[in-house]
Image: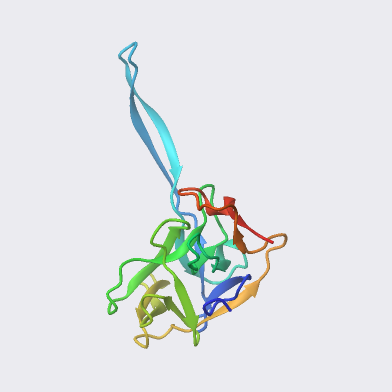
Amino acid sequence: MGNGFPTAKFFRIINADTGLCLAAAHGGTTHGAQKAYDRLTGEVGFIPYSHTNDQVLTVRKPKHDRAEVWWFNDVPNTYGDPEWHLVNVNKDIRSSFALHVGSLDGTQAVELGLYGWGRTDQTQWKAGDGTFWPTTHDNMVATLLPADDGRYRAVLAPLGSSSNQQWRFEETELPGESVPVRRKGIYEPSGIEPGKWGEVI
């Protein structure tokens, strides 16, 4: 177990109290138009564009698809320091996404979300005794809280402050795929989708 998570395995993150799991979901597409100016004719027009939004974190019943499958990255960076990231396998055309939490003060619940894997300031995770938490705050653990719409939302909350703080990691397989266990090359390229430099053996 790497930092309490399955090592070199794919797994689902399932809340033991509710049976719900953490999964990635498509963040939608943004459409717009950019103003353009033709220097020869003087005409002004608009060029339509669209781009894929970042994936978002959802809480749902397991459907046994890729969106709910994770792996734990404990591959050292170029300085030899381990990077304990929870990475979702459901990457889009730009990036893989990792479980992330924003600023913490240690007392208030803070939403969990997804963050492009390979970006700086990525949340590092540790697990034990059926809970998991950021390595910087062992008093704050992943929790499911009821939302206003009757669903649940994933947050970090103080340990013991709420129910739904117990989790299990259900190992699974993706035929023909393996978890990356070392990096390609000497340098970590900045801004490049990490799947292009992660390597499996």
Residue depicted at x 50% and y 85%: 130
Residue depicted at x 55% and y 55%: 91
Q: Is residue 148 visible?
A: no
Q: Is residue 184 visible?
A: yes
Q: Image height check: is 16 above or below 95? A: below
Left or right of 179? Residue 92 is: left
Q: Image height check: is 1 above or below 71? A: below
Question: Is residue 98 or residue 153 the one in the foreground?
Answer: 98
User: Residue lying furthest top in this view?
Assistant: 41
Q: Position of residue 154 (x, y in %)?
A: 41, 72
Q: Position of residue 53 (x, y in %)?
A: 43, 49
Q: Image height check: is 27 above or below 149? A: above
Q: Position of residue 6 (x, y in %)?
A: 59, 76
Q: Quadrant of residue 32?
A: top left
User: Residue lying furthest right in this view?
Assistant: 176
Question: Is residue 95 or residue 57 the one in the foreground?
Answer: 95
Residue depicted at x 30% and y 72%: 104
Q: How is the image coloured?
A: rainbow
Quadrant of the snapshot with the C terminus? bottom right
Q: Position of residue 70 (x, y in %)?
A: 56, 67
Left or right of 193? Residue 199 is: right
**What is the tally of numbered marks visible in this picture?**
0
Quadrant of the snapshot with the N terminus? bottom right
Residue depicted at x 60% and y 61%: 182
Question: Is residue 75 or residue 85 the one in the foreground?
Answer: 75
